[in-house]
Amino acid sequence: MTARQIVLDALQFYEIEVISVSGNRIRVQNSFEIEVGANRLYKLFNAGHVVAPFNDIDELCWFIQSF
């Protein structure tokens, strides 16, 4: 399973709406965008600015849900 597929599965599990997928970028609800990087590092963007890097997919999903 690829890192991108892990993110997509987690987003589905947490019922976070996926707007679009393009390469290693996933646009989701609340104007967030996730960049899937090497070694399962996920960068969360909002309005083009890095909000935070995450290495735990659950923490990333919890953060997105909190908005």
Image: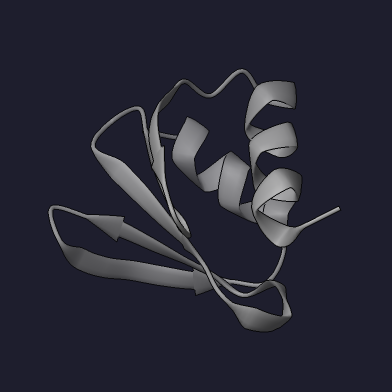
Q: Is residue 30 positioned above or below 50 on the image? A: above
Residue 15's x, y, as percent?
Answer: 61, 18
Q: Is residue 29 positioned above or below 39 on the image? A: above
Residue at 60 percent across and 42 percent down: it is: 61
Residue 56's x, y, as percent?
Answer: 72, 63
The image's colour scheme reads: one colour
Given residues 30 and 67, the one toward you in this image is 30
Which quadrant of the figure has residue 5? Answer: top right
Which quadrant of the figure has residue 35? Answer: bottom left
Which residue appears farthest toward the left when viewing the image? 47
Residue at 53 percent across and 24 percent down: it is: 16
Residue at 62 percent across and 75 percent down: it is: 41
Q: Is 49 on the left-hand or right-hand side of 14?
A: left
Residue 11's x, y, as percent?
Answer: 63, 32
Residue at 70 percent across and 54 percent down: it is: 57
- Screen quadrant of the C terminus: top left
Which residue appears farthest toward the right when viewing the image? 1
Residue 40's x, y, as percent?
Answer: 70, 72
Q: Is residue 45 positioned above or below 61 on the image? A: below
